[in-house]
Amino acid sequence: MLDSVENLKAKAVIWDMDGVIVDTGRYHFRAWQEAFRKRGVTFTEEAFRRNFGQRNDTIVRVTLGKDTPQTEIDAITREKESYFRSIVKDNIRPLPGAVALLKSLAENGFKVGLASSAPVENIELLTTTLGIRDCFQAIVSGREVAEGKPNPQGYLLAAQKLGVAPKNCVVIEDAVAGLAGARRAGMHCVAVTTTHPRASLSEADLIVETLENVSVSDLERLIDG
């Protein structure tokens, strides 16, 4: 149970994936451009950055309109993600400091989760290629929640799977929507300026340009206050 003595003392770090662990932004952008181009719609870089970190269905509705049929949303997202995986599979590179921090967390007694808006196929491809799949005790994909970020459902589900109270969780994010979701979940947050400028991430407890500048001690201090 979540309220056991052991779990009340447990600490966790819940990671976003794209833009935090892996530098995939350019490939997602190209995939969205291709999917929308087939439908005569121009998808700009500004629109991509504004919506980065949100679920695919949300991005499609924002771009094509809230009355877009679900069948069309499903078709666009399937095409987009299939194309994304085809172009990213030979270009999967971890962001600086991410893998080292991820592996050091387990060595220091942290539980580790992943809460991403991405479909599970993307999560499996990226984490397996980087050899970090076994670093996560809990994984939440975009399909497991009714609403994506900034709704806190994904983070709360990850904490539930890990058996850790939200107040004892630190989220590592790069997207404004993800940061808002972490705050709504009652969790601490580290923001990485991978996709958004520092000024857009001011709600975070700690803002860094690279995870090379984050230690396990930094994360412990956020939780312990």
Image (tube, grey):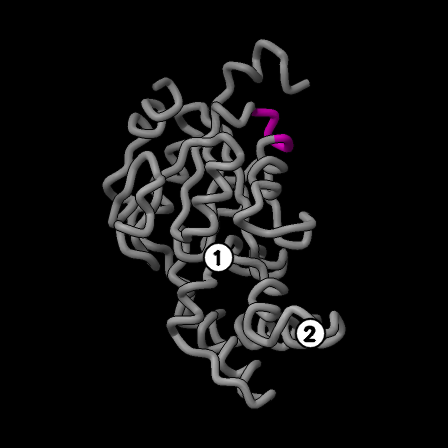
**Foreground: 210 or 156?**
156
Q: Residues within 10 Å of mark 1 (few under 14, many from 20)?
A: many
Main secondary structure found in the magenta portion: helix
Q: Any magenta on residue 157? A: no
Which residue is depicted at the point 34% across and 44% down? Answer: 191
Which residue is depicted at the point 49% across and 58% down? Answer: 129
Taking the image as shown, residue 175 lies to the left or right of residue 85, namely left
User: Which type of secondary structure does the marked residue at label 2 adopt?
Assistant: loop
The quarter of the picture where residue 171 lies is: top left
Which residue is depicted at the point 30% across and 44% down? Answer: 211
Q: Residue at label 2?
A: 68
Q: Residue at label 1?
A: 53
Q: Any magenta on residue 162? A: yes
Residue stretch rendered in magenta on the structure? 160-164
**Foreground: 5 or 134?**
5
Taking the image as shown, residue 68 lies to the left or right of residue 129, namely right
Whether residue 173 is visible to the viewer of this picture, yes or no, is yes
The quarter of the picture where residue 212 lies is: top left
Q: Please state which amino acid type lies under the numbered disc 2.
A: Thr
User: Which type of secondary structure does the marked residue at label 1 adopt?
Assistant: loop
Whether residue 90 is visible to the viewer of this picture, yes or no, is no
The spot of residue 176 in percent (x, y) is: 41, 51
Of label 2 and label 1, which has the lower sequence position?
1
Indicate whether 188 appears above or below 41.
Answer: above
Do labels 2 and 1 touch, CB within 8 Å? no
Q: Please state which amino acid type lies under the numbered disc 1.
A: Gly
For the image, the number of numbered tags is 2
Q: Quadrant of the N terminus?
A: top right
Taking the image as shown, residue 14 lies to the left or right of residue 209, namely right
